[in-house]
Every structure is written in C-alpha cells, then in structure tokens.
C-alpha cells in the first residue's frame, strides 16, 4: 500500500454531505506540479472545527483558523517532506482535491489516525474474521480506529481505540506494522488530510473466543466480521486496502502466529480478493 503510487479518488469524487461540491480535478491535473490556471476550489471549514478552535476554546481539538496564530506549520509527515503554498499552508502531498481549507479536519496538514487490526481464523467454517465496528455516522463496517490525541504515542492510541470501541484490552505494542502514511479519505482537502498507522495482531481461536465484545460510544455494533470479497470491498474509507495488506503479511513465510492450515485459509481468501 504505497502512498505515492496512486492518485487519490475518494478525496476528489466523494465528500461529507456538508461540504460544497469539489472543483473538478482530472487525473492528469492532480499533481501540484501540473499547470492548472483555472483551478478555483471553494473554501470550506466546518462550523464544528471553528467551535473547537483551540486558540479560542482551551478544550478544543482544532488548530486556529488563522494560520498565523499557529506556532508551527508541519514541515513533514509520514508522506515525506511537505510543500507549502504562498500563505504558508501545507499542501496535500498527493495533490489537488477540489476543496481548500480544512473541511471537517481539525489540523492544518496531516491529521493522524491509528487503526488496530485484529484477526483470527474460524476453524468451524474455515473463514478469516476481523474485529470490526459498525460506525454510527454512516453505518459502514470498519476497523475500530480513531484519532491520535495531542502528544499521544501511537501505540497508546491503538490500544486505547481498540478498548474504547470494542471493549477489548490487548497490547498493540506487539502488533506488526501494516501501513503508515496518507489515507485517501472523503474528508481530505488541499490543506488538511488523513494519515494513519495500522498495526495487526493475529489471535489463536481460544483467545479470540474468550474476548468480551462491548460496542463503544461511536459504534452501533461490534463483532467478529467475516472477511469475504464482498464484505472487504464495502469496508469504510481505505480499510479494504489495509485488510488486504494484513492478509498478505499473514501469508509471509515464517509467521509464528499462524499455523499451516490457517495460512492456507488466508491464501484462499486472498486469491479471491
Ligand atoms: C478512522 C480510521 C481511518 C481514518 C482515515 C479515522 O477517522 O477512525 O479508522 O483509517 O479516519 O480514513
């Protein structure tokens, strides 16, 4: 899942309902390096972001709307060294999105999330399952991820989000790193975008069965979600790509956490994805 090997699509063709229409950005004009003199994206910042402006509201989670009040604009992110526009705002590392401003995202530049991916094999029907939540905001099934709190160490976020959203306490510090970088998210704009760190733990069936699942406040439901070509393709945001990368990692030779039989089940699923 390389971050620069693709041009974003959700960030150009999808948007939350409250955003204005995105200015059209054809594939060959995504890159900031391509001349596009007609480019005039609408500016949008959500009222909820303004309400949480930390320069006016000490409990707020958002940066000030006035960039000159920022102590520092980020110079780099997981996507690499960032380029800035004439007003000093960091530019989306993949390119144009058709919307200026921060939209629903609180931070100028990268907004960091963390995605804990927990899998197990169902030996009854020979399927791969993942701990997933059904999101309250759009009803889609998703990895139980969330935003990194200010100054929080990412392993802590992974462990905390897993606990808050599913009721499961596992130490994500021992998980394997699946992905770290830009996410093609429908909320992204030219000046604010999502990046995530995804870590994975594979559980043996005994441990998986013993877990008590409790849906957290952002979740309508939580369950062991059966991975099939259809269910994986309908996962939230870029979670389909994260799950595929996880399954590939599980099939790698020498993974002690998977038995030979389990690896064959994962390989059969991967061939169908
Ligand atoms: C979600 C993560 C997701 C990220 C990027 C966050 O709001 O909680 O699961 O990976 O957005 O789409």
Image (cartoon, rainbow, N blue to C red):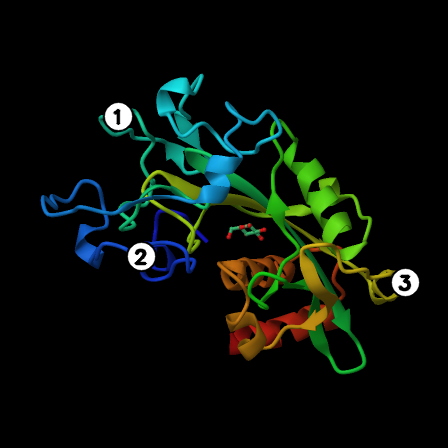
User: Which circle marks residue 87 in the picture?
Assistant: 1
User: Which circle marks residue 210 in the picture?
Assistant: 3
| The quadrant where residue 152 appears | top right
Relative to 59, is 95 above or below? below
Q: Counting residues from the N terminus, which is met first, the one under dot 2 or under dot 1?
A: 2
Spatial separation of the CA atoms under disc 2 and disc 3? 43 Å
Q: How many marks?
A: 3
Q: Is residue 252 left or right of residue 261?
A: left
What residue is shown at x 20% (from left), y 58% (from top)?
26
Badge 3, how many Cα within 10 Å: few under 14, some, many 20+?
few
Q: Counting residues from the N terminus, which is met first, the one under dot 2 or under dot 3?
A: 2
Q: Position of residue 106 (x, y in %)?
A: 48, 37
Relative to 181, is 269 above or below? below
| The quadrant where residue 110 appears | top left
**Which residue carries the number 2 mark?**
12
What residue is shown at x 51% (from left), y 24% (from top)?
56
- Given residues 32 and 138, the one toward you in this image is 138
């Amino acid at each position: 899942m390389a971050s620069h090997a693709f041009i974003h699509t959700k960030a150009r063709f999808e948007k939350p309902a409250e955003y204005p229409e995105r200015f059209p950005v054809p594939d060959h004009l995504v890159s900031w390096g391509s001349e596009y003199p007609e480019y005039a994206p609408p500016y949008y910042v959500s009222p909820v972001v303004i309400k949480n402006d930390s320069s006016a509201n000490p409990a707020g989670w958002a940066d000030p709307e006035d960039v000159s009040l920022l102590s520092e604009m980020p110079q780099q992110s997981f996507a690499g060294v960032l380029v800035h526009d004439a007003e000093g705002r960091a530019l989306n590392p993949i390119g144009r999105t058709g919307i200026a401003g921060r939209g629903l995202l609180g931070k100028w530049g990268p907004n960091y999330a963390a995605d804990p991916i927990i899998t197990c094999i169902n030996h009854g029907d020979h399927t791969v399952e993942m701990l997933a939540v059904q999101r309250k905001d759009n009803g889609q099934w998703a990895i139980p991820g969330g935003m990194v709190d200010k100054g929080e160490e990412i392993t802590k976020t992974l462990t905390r989000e897993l606990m808050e959203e599913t009721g499961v306490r596992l130490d994500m510090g021992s998980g394997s790193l699946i992905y770290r970088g830009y996410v093609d998210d429908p909320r992204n704009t030219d000046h604010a975008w999502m990046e995530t760190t995804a870590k994975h733990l594979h559980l043996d069936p005994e441990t998986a069965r013993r877990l008590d699942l409790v849906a957290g406040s952002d979740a309508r439901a939580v369950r062991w979600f059966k991975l099939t070509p259809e269910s994986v393709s309908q996962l939230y945001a870029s979670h389909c790509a994260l799950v595929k990368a996880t399954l590939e990692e599980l099939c790698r030779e020498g993974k002690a956490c998977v038995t030979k039989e389990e690896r064959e089940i994962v390989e059969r699923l991967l061939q169908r994805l």
